[in-house]
Image: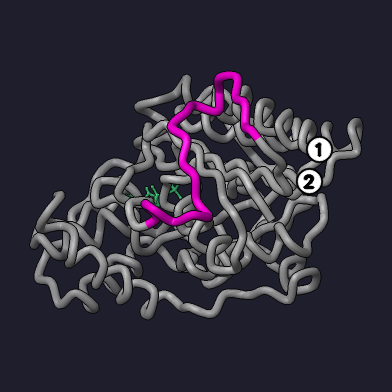
Amino acid sequence: MRVLITGAAGFLGSNLVDRFLRDGHQVVGLDNFVTGSPDNIAHLTGNPNFEFVRHNISNFTYVAGPLDGVLHFASPASPIDYLEHPIPTLKVGALGTHNALGIAKAKSARFFLASTSEVYGDPLVHPQPEGYWGNVNPIGPRGVYDEAKRFAEAMTMAYHRFHGLDTRIVRIFNTYGPRMRPHDGRVVSNFIVQAIKGEPLTLYGDGQQTRSFTFVDDEVEGIYQLFLRGDAMPMNIGNPNEFTVRELAEVVLELTGSKSPIVQRPLPEDDPKVRKPDITRARTVLGWEPTVQLREGVSRTIAYFRGVVGRTA
Ligand code: UDP
């Protein structure tokens, strides 16, 4: 296969590029480096199966040659990033998705949308099955991301129903692991970098809010299997083991052996109180489930950050 991956220099995008290349496929990677980094694809320089194009998918995009798949992973995805880039975030979810769908249609390629658990907002149903419609504040600070992704899902389903395009939608839950940026702003990277540097761990609110953390290799494998073998309806891909953010802080302190204190900071506006995927559909349709649990995944991520924080923090 020959596939186009937007956001190819991002945390998830670059790991997905590697997954396709591992099976001998050809990948065209697109990224404008708004939050992605050349470092994430530096190891692919000279690889004959990988082409890179520096471009913003929210603008008109022409890709030469045949394509079997278009995977749209371009978007700021960390709350601090979409607060800093609110309009590009809305544009890449809306205009970028439209352009990526147009490419898929022109090439008769399968389209794959990277959506998010944020479509469930601050959920009133727990855990969240795909049939839950969500509880999103459209005009809050997170609305630029949540609503862009909800629009992207609607657009994808419209191309599926109206044009008969072969499509997939994954709802990605909090994912962590190597290649996250030290200053990504997400809780796992923040806590690990703070612990390694002996700085206080910044717990937002009382830390009783929950998340279900997925190790990147599990997330990418679920995405890859959904692309190959899934269907058009949205699918949650995430680890259903739920932790409070305070529990995560304690695990990070224990596994780093750090003496850092935990300090409380204000809870960001509209911060979801709970999050946990119902993965019945992924288990049934794909036979997929996560294999790396929190302690192992955090240990591997600590090893990664120990190698990079000295250089880039
Ligand atoms: N959080 C925290 N300290 C940090 C960063 C995040 O306590 O330094 C909390 C945040 O308020 C949220 C959870 O950790 O409740 C996950 O935040 P993250 O930004 O990783 O992703 P989200 O799931 O909110 O998109």
Location of residue 57 in the rendering, given as x and y in whole percent from the top left corner: 55, 28
Lower sequence index among marks 2 and 1: 1
According to the picture, the residue beneath numbered tag 1 turns out to be: 157
The quarter holding residue 179 reads bottom left
The N terminus - image quarter: bottom right
The vertical placement of 23 against 139, above or below, is: below
Q: Main secondary structure of the magenta part?
A: loop
10 Å neighbourhood of mark 2: few (<14), some, or many (≥20)? many
Q: Nearer the viewer, residue 303 or 269?
A: 303
Location of residue 271 in the rendering, given as x and y in whole percent from the top left corner: 45, 42
Q: Residue, x 89% and y 32% (percent of image)?
A: 163
Q: Residue, x 46% and y 64% (percent of image)?
A: 216
Where disc 2 sits, the SS reads strand
Q: Nearer the viewer, residue 46 or 129?
A: 46
- 58 falls in the magenta region: yes
Q: Range of the magenta residues?
A: 44-64
Q: Residue, x 18% and y 54% (percent of image)?
A: 263
